Image: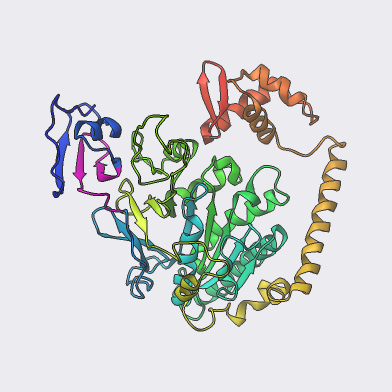
């Protein structure tokens, strides 16, 4: 534990102070940010930045004011990829540029990416900026907005394909998978094992916003969406088809199961906006962050909380402003434990219609389109992407297909449902308030109307779920859902 002396001199208001601290060998450095701020008589923890090497040492930087309080909009230069396929998305607390990769020219790989953030954290603005950068860099953008198009309304007409429903999102993912397969065949014939932008195909970025709605339990097309996203993450990189999910910061089980995304988490571009505690535990468990890593929580407001009499005038007024939008950690960047903030994207106040500042970010001209060579692979849904009537017919066919498959599965299982045993166990653990034994899990599983199982199968499945990080061993013979 990093200890502070009993008396620490107050920090001058006009100085930046940098301290290198360490603990003795054989100890691991830990710290309490609130205690650290108190020791220096600082009422705004945002003025303190702590970076550790994961073991004995830490660099503590104290600023006269919160360095991320005010951010400018991006410049045109920020939005253009550099020689390493990166754009500048904002600044770190020390003023250095924060970069995110859109493509890796060294390996010829498209990017797999994940952006997490709770409500109000700035996820939609971050997505808008990346979409605008893709347009300016002639990247083909396929964007599924599962909030009915409300997350990024300015994207309409600025991307090659905008999907706003569950059914159209499935059609989009099917097309992307087919394009990746077609490119794979063409590139194999050319002897190419990597992607080169513009030779002859453009980079294709497939993005699902509000991905929880497509991948959470009970989502109408969860199994197919999970499969297609997993396959695109595996096979799309070398043929120039990137995959991104933008989601609420909940548990990974809400995103098709943690095994679906583990490889994307470890190797993709991961942006963590304001998060939930369960998401943080899962990121550490999945190995994305070293054990013991501490990230300073991102508050809703930069205004320090001050105690005042409950009887003072105006004490009942709500003056809490959610003004930390865009503040984040770039977990896949060179400084994953350093807080950064994205550029200010769009107008400060809500607009009654489309935001002119966001529209200006996209720039003039039309978006890049999928190469004609892949139109046949993309199928009729790609051709119908701008035709509301034609797309309605195709989406109805998807619904009818799903209804038929569900009926066939129910009939095959004798009307008892077709859930896999691990899913049934996850449901039982998630609904329980306390940790459960294998026998208790068995009783709940047998009561769900599904096929009968034995306790041995339950024990084996619980062990596998715990190894995957979906369940936690809460004690000898006790299990609970990983939250």
Residue 445, by quadrant, is top right
- The answer to whether residue 133 is visible is yes
| Residue at 54% from the left image edge and 70% from the top image edge | 141
Position of 346 relative to 40 (above/below): below
Pick whichever, 41 or 127, lies toward us. 41
The magenta stretch spans which residues?
Answer: 46-68
Residue found at the far front of this picture: 313
Q: Position of residue 361 (x, y in %)?
A: 45, 73
Q: Position of residue 275 (x, y in %)?
A: 46, 43
| Residue at 66% from the left image edge and 25% from the top image edge | 458
Pick whichever, 296 or 43, lies toward us. 43
Q: How is the image coloured?
A: rainbow
Q: Position of residue 350 (x, y in %)?
A: 51, 62
Position of 408 relative to 447 (above/below): below
Q: Is residue 396 left or right of residue 248?
A: right
Q: Position of residue 301 (x, y in %)?
A: 40, 46
Residue 25, by quadrant, is top left
């Amino acid at each position: 534990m990093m200890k502070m002396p009993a008396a620490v001199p107050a920090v001058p208001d006009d100085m930046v102070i940098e301290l290198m601290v360490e603990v003795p060998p054989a100890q691991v450095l830990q710290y309490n940010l609130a205690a650290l701020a108190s020791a220096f008589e600082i009422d705004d923890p945002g003025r303190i930045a702590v970076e550790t090497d994961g073991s004995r040492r830490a660099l503590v930087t104290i600023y006269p004011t919160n360095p991320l309080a005010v951010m400018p909009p991006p410049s045109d230069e920020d939005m253009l990829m550099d020689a390493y396929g990166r754009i500048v998305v904002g600044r770190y607390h020390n003023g250095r540029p924060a970069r995110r990769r859109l493509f890796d020219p060294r390996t010829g790989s498209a990017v797999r990416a994940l952006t997490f953030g709770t409500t109000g954290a700035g996820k939609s603005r971050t997505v808008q900026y990346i979409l605008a950068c893709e347009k300016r860099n002639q990247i083909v953008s396929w964007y599924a907005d599962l909030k009915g198009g409300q997350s990024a309304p300015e994207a309409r007409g600025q991307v090659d394909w905008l999907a706003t429903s569950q059914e159209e999102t499935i059609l989009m993912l099917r097309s992307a998978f087919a394009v990746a397969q077609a490119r794979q065949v063409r590139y194999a014939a050319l002897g190419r094992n990597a992607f080169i932008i513009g030779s002859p195909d453009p980079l294709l970025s497939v993005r699902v916003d509000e991905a929880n709605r497509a991948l959470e339990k009970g989502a109408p097309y969860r199994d197919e969406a999970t499969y297609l996203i997993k396959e695109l993450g595996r096979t799309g990189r070398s043929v120039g088809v990137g995959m991104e999910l933008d989601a609420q910061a909940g548990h990974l089980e809400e995103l098709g199961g943690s095994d679906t995304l583990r490889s994307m988490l470890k190797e993709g571009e991961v942006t963590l906006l304001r998060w939930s505690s369960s998401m943080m535990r899962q990121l550490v468990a999945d190995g994305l962050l070293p054990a013991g890593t501490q990230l300073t929580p991102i508050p809703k407001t930069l205004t320090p909380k001050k105690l005042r009499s409950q009887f003072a005038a105006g004490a009942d007024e709500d003056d809490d402003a959610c003004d930390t939008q865009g503040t984040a950690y770039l977990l896949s960047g060179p400084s994953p434990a350093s807080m950064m903030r994205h550029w200010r994207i769009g107008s400060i106040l809500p607009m009654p219609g489309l935001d002119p500042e966001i529209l200006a970010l996209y720039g003039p001209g039309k978006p890049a389109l999928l190469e004609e060579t892949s139109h046949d692979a993309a199928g009729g849904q790609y051709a119908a992407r701008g035709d509301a009537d034609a797309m309605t017919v195709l989406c109805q066919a998807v619904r009818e297909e799903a209804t038929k498959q569900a009926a066939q599965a129910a009939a095959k299982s004798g009307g008892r449902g077709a859930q896999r045993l691990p899913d049934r166990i996850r449901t039982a653990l998630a609904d329980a308030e306390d940790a459960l034994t294998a026998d208790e899990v068995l009783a709940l599983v047998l009561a769900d109307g599904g096929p009968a199982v034995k306790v041995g199968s339950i024990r084996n499945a619980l062990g596998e779920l715990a190894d995957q990080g979906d369940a936690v061993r809460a004690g000898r013979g006790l299990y609970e859902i990983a939250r």
